Image (cartoon, rainbow, N blue to C red):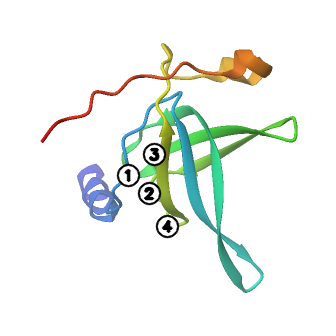
Amino acid sequence: MKKIIEKIENKNILKKIPKFRSGDTINVQSWILEGEKKRIQNFEGIVIYIRNRGFRSSFCVRKISNGEGIEKVFKKYSPIIKNIEIKKYGKVKKSKLYYIRKLHGKSYKIKERKIKKKIK
């Protein structure tokens, strides 16, 4: 039974999602329904954690808006997500950044990780 479920889930994983890690700053474009209207809303923030569970994978993004911390959990393969764009690569040592919830001001910043670009 487990193998049948895995086959069905693997067929539904069609989206190409960029590889990102905890500490990266990303911009998630998601569809929002307001009555009968449908529009795209951007949510830009730091990835706090990633939960890898195959088709049921999710990630949490945190941003600060008007002095309030806002966290939003997105399903990785949800049809609601239109696009994920990586803004900055963060350099962190932990995979779950729950300690960021207590930080304010300059201490909230995360050092940037340098990426080696492949030359073709």
Residue tagged 4 = 79
Whether tag 3 and tag 2 are in contact, CB under 8 A, the answer is yes
The quadrant of the image that shows the N terminus is bottom left
Q: As drawn, is 10 to the left or to the right of 29?
A: left
Lower position in the chain sequence, tag 3 or tag 4: 3
Q: Which mark is residue 77?
A: 2
Q: Which mark is residue 57?
A: 3
The amino acid type found where label 2 is placed reads Tyr
Label 4 Cα crowd, 10 Å radius (few <14 / some 14-19 / many 20+): few
Instruction: Give the mark toward the camera: 3 or 4.
Output: 4
Residue at (64, 57) in percent of width and height: 42
Q: Between marks 3 and 4, how big is the CA–CA gap?
A: 13 Å
Furthest-bottom residue in this view: 36
The amino acid type found where label 3 is placed reads Ser
Residue tagged 1 = 17
Residue at (29, 50) in percent of width and height: 2
Q: Which SS class for mark 1?
A: loop
Q: Between marks 2 and 4, how big is the CA–CA gap?
A: 7 Å
Q: Which SS class for mark 2?
A: loop
Quarter occupied by residue 106: top right
- Viewer-closest of 90 and 78: 90
Quarter occupied by residue 31: bottom right
Q: Between marks 3 and 2, how big is the CA–CA gap?
A: 7 Å
